[in-house]
Amino acid sequence: MSELDIRKAVKERYSKVATSQADCCGGGARGDDSSLVTLGGDVPVEASEVNAGCGSPLLLVTPKEGDVVLDLGSGGGIDVFRASQIVGEKGRALGVDATPEMVWRARETKSKYGDRYANVEFRLGEIERLPIESGAVDYVISNCVINLSPDKPAVFRESFRVLKAGGVFAVADITLPEEIPESARNDMDSWSACIAGALVDSEYRKLLEDAGFQEVQIEHVSDSNIGKYPFSYNSSHVKARKPY
């Protein structure tokens, strides 16, 4: 499969999610989000309606007032809205998503609430080529999106670039305990369902370190099987730091 084929399949799936509330991640990779109900206060109901992931990246970090948080693949914006209330009006919460329908929906949600989310911004762009200034953010977060990228080294390099010195990369993602069959890697439905593009833990760690990150931690939150293929995957929390 070409990179173009993968990007097309992913965008088609998530444009449907944005417009019809179809299921993300194939319905099988959701993480328990209940512990985030009160984190950052209430979030727009419109954002919670487009919410799927494999963990809780905001539970991995402790942003303070005035910090800048960037969400990769921000979708309907639920983690961006949460982060905006944590960092306060002196901080900023940014979301980047490659699906125009997702960005439009998130911006529409923001506009409904007037100045309540004045520190929020959603930008259209690919996470491999972030429309963000270098050294501009304190935290890079993401929820079950990096596995969808056909060029993960670029995602990690870009994350490293936009972080300030000492900044933290903290994401929820699908990882694999071992390599999966080539037939699964070449299955387009499994790509857009968050599975076929997932990395083995050891490769995830290596690519982050190759990008310059230190203190890489990978914690498995839960594990599951896919009915279509006889192998397992993990919903994982991944955390790393850019050196000072």
Image: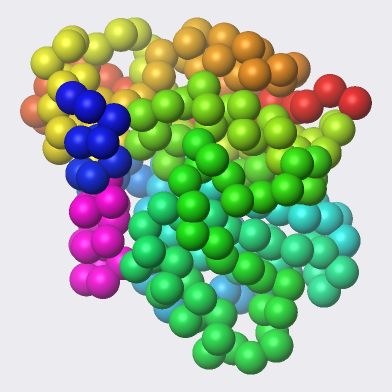
The image quarter containing residue 138 is top right
Q: Nearer the viewer, residue 234 or 65?
A: 65
Q: Residue at x 50, y 8 (%)?
A: 202
Task: State whether residue 107 appears in this view.
Answer: yes
Q: Is residue 105 above or below residue 174?
A: below
Q: Residue at x 85, y 32 (%)?
A: 166
Q: Nearer the viewer, residue 48 or 115?
A: 115
The image quarter containing residue 95 is bottom right
Q: Position of residue 71 (x, y in %)?
A: 59, 51
Reply yes or no: does residue 23 show up in magenta: yes
Q: Position of residue 85 (x, y in %)?
A: 72, 69
Q: Residue at x 71, y 53 (%)?
A: 69
Color style of the picture: rainbow
Q: Position of residue 160 (x, y in %)?
A: 69, 30
Q: Nearer the viewer, residue 96 or 116?
A: 96
The image quarter containing residue 88 is bottom right
Q: Residue at x 59, y 88 (%)?
A: 113
Q: How many marks?
A: 0
Q: Is residue 175 above or below residue 200?
A: below
Reply yes or no: does residue 85 show up in magenta: no
Compared across the picture, whether 92 is left or right of 221 comes to right
In the image, the segment drawn in magenta is 10-24
Q: Is residue 230 above or below residue 73?
A: above
Quarter of the picture holding the N terminus = top left
What is the residue that sits farthest to the right in this orientation? 244
Predominant SS along the magenta part: helix
Task: State whether residue 59 appears in this view.
Answer: no
Q: Position of residue 215 (x, y in %)?
A: 74, 18
Quarter of the picture holding the C terminus = top right
Compared across the picture, whether 51 is left or right of 107 comes to left
